[in-house]
Image (cartoon, rainbow, N blue to C red):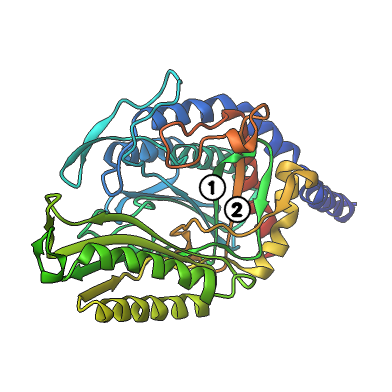
Amino acid sequence: MKNIVALLGLFCTLSLYSQDTNPIIEKLASEIEKEVIDLRRHFHQYPELSNREVKTAERIAAELKKLGLKVDTGIAHTGVVGVLDTGKPGPTIGLRADIDGLPVVERAPIPFASKEETEYLGEKVGVMHACGHDTHIAMMLGAAKVLTQMKDDLKGKLVFVFQPAEEGAPPGEEGGAELMIKEGLIDKYGIEVMFGQHISAGLDVGKIRYKLGGIMAAVNSMKIKVKGKQTHGSRPWGGVDPITVSAQMILGLQTIVSRQMELTKEACVITIGKIKGGFRSNIIPEEVEMLGTIRTLDKDMQTDIHKRIRKTLVNIAEASDAEVEIEIDSGYPITFNNHALTRDMLPALYSAAGEDNVMVMNPTTGAEDFSFFAQEVPGLYFFVGGKPLDVAELDAAPHHTPDFFIDESGLITGVKTMSYLTLQYMNKNN
């Protein structure tokens, strides 16, 4: 009789976790929804820039300690890690949220809009969570609360990784996921798989988008110095005009993408975002500096495009008797979703949002340093909807802009998704 009762208990437990939805997750997520929104509003109102997330980290650590988790701080400068150890054998799962804001002055008409100001690269700037990292923190803290209350039903360990400087460390500093890994995060905590999510201002609340393989592009920053010979603006033949040469280079870079790359294979982008040279209208300057970004979704194309950039710029410079210096940094790699892991975790996404609300997406030429984690262990990264249903996708303010806006009713989807992913992975790997 005891064996029958035990088997019935096991059957009930297995049934609970194989249903489309888990009533415990649904109940707990619903109960803390207001708390998650309140946390989001706090972090939104008081954003901090990359590697400067001091008060943000303090609040995160305090919230994790309330849950009774083991908390480590000061990781990669301002990163925070909370560990939920069930005391039972099982996998060690990493859940990641980024925590930094951007040098953007907020224009969104909300009562908790940021009024923060700071200095960035020697200039006074506003600070705003213009990419939704405030929602990532809140959703992760919500998932931590749900999963902590479900500790008796879990096996293994959960490592909640709150990562600074996703938007890039200030010049001359290290930071972000790359520095966390360099400091030994993966080995120290024994992380064997990583899950990450990003709110999307252009995706309806309640929906999830994912993709197998490369979901976000590799990014490389580029600095180009064009050296000519200064002369009077009335006598261009008396010097070498680096401004004209730079204009030719910009056009040449665009033909690399439009005429030399196989765009039916994967997308790629070369953008020059800054050009500086000269002081007066009647002086041809000696030097021009350009800053740009390179986005690629295929490693072979990345290598090829870098070679073509150097060849194009050098040849244009030589044709005009100018000189050129080219610097391309190591940047972020492609954010790559492990194929097997992504397929295995689809039921968790369906449980969180409903199968009809989970969609395969095209890759985006945006970049993410979650990619560094996904190089170390199998990773899954996906997008959660944050667009109000009554706003057309084309009318939604893009990320990294002053009008960026998130419908907070979408946050509960992120809380549930991280919770379901945890259960799905633990059950499949026990």
Mark 1, secondary structure of its residue: strand
What's the residue type where badge 2 is placed? Answer: Phe
Q: Amino acid at mark 1?
A: His
Q: In the image, is residue 429 above or below residue 125?
A: below
Residue 294 at what x, y percent from top left? 42, 65
Q: Residue at x 86, y 56 (%)?
A: 3
412 or 293, which lies in front?
293
- Residue 3 vertical position relative to residue 316 in the rendered view, above or below: above
Report if residue 255 is visible in the image.
yes
Q: Is residue 430 visible?
A: no
In the picture, measured across the screen, residue 331 lies left or right of residue 256, that is left
Give percent across and percent down for residue 16.
79, 46
The residue under the point 26% across, 64% down is: 244
The Cα–Cα distance between marks 2 and 1, rounded to whole angstroms, is: 6 Å
Residue placed under numbered mark 1 in the picture: 198
Which residue is denoted by mark 2 in the rendering? 382
Residue 155 figure quarter: bottom right
Badge 1 density bin: few <14, some 14–19, many ≥20, Cα 10 Å:
many
For the residues labelled 2 and 1, say whether their Cβ atoms are less than 8 Å apart: yes
**Could you say which quadrant of the image residue 171 lies in?**
bottom left
- Residue 143: horizontal and vertical position, in percent? 56, 41
